[in-house]
Image (spheres, grey):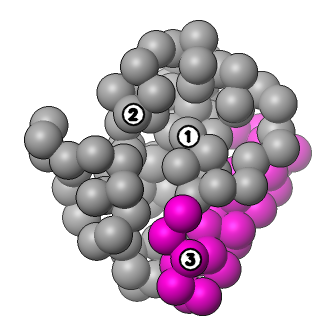
Amino acid sequence: MTRTDHQSPSDTHTSLVVSDIPSPDADWSTISEFALTFNAYEALGSLEACAEIANARTAITLTDLRTCLFYEQRRWRHFGEKPDPSSMEYIRGILEKIRAKIGAGDKN
């Protein structure tokens, strides 16, 4: 699944299926690739808006969850290393919430 410039966040969510979401034991490279299928900078309009959602760690909506995952990918890319174990636990938790929402048909 890839996002094109003309897709809105809801368009990206509409095409998302459970099989697109990395498995619970996926490696960082696979998770990172999936995280980039949603450009939260474009969806929310700014780095600051993304940071506010991601750093709050209270995401409920699919857009917020995908924003958090995207932001974590960008954060660790900036650090130039793979996430530490605690961060990977948080990231895997985000994936599980995304998987649950998509599995239940909740694309909001």
Q: Earlier in the sequence, mark 3 or mark 2?
A: 2
Instruction: Assess whether residue 102 is covered by the magenta stretch.
Output: yes
Asked if disc 2 and disc 1 are in contact, CB closer than 8 Å, the reply is: yes
Residue 15 image point, x, y percent? 28, 71
For image coordinates 58% across by 25% down, the residue present is: 50
Residue at disc 2, secondary structure = helix
Is residue 35 shown above or below 73?
below
> Residue 67: which numbered mark, if any?
1
Residue 81 image point, x, y percent? 59, 28
The residue that disc 3 covers is: 106
For image coordinates 64% across by 55% down, the residue present is: 61
Q: Distance from label 3 to label 2 (Cα)?
A: 18 Å
Three-letter amino acid code of the residue under disc 2? Ala
Instruction: Assess whether residue 79 is covered by the magenta stretch.
Output: no
Q: Distance from label 2 to label 1 (Cα)?
A: 9 Å
Task: Please identify the quadrant where the C terminus is shown.
Answer: bottom right
Q: Earlier in the sequence, mark 2 or mark 1?
A: 2
Q: Main secondary structure of the magenta part?
A: helix
The residue segment tinted magenta is: 82-108
Is residue 101 visible in the rendered structure shown here?
Answer: yes
In the image, taking residue 9 as reference, residue 8 lies left or right, namely left
For image coordinates 83% across by 44% down, the residue present is: 58
For image coordinates 69% across by 71% down, the residue present is: 96
Three-letter amino acid code of the residue under disc 1? Thr
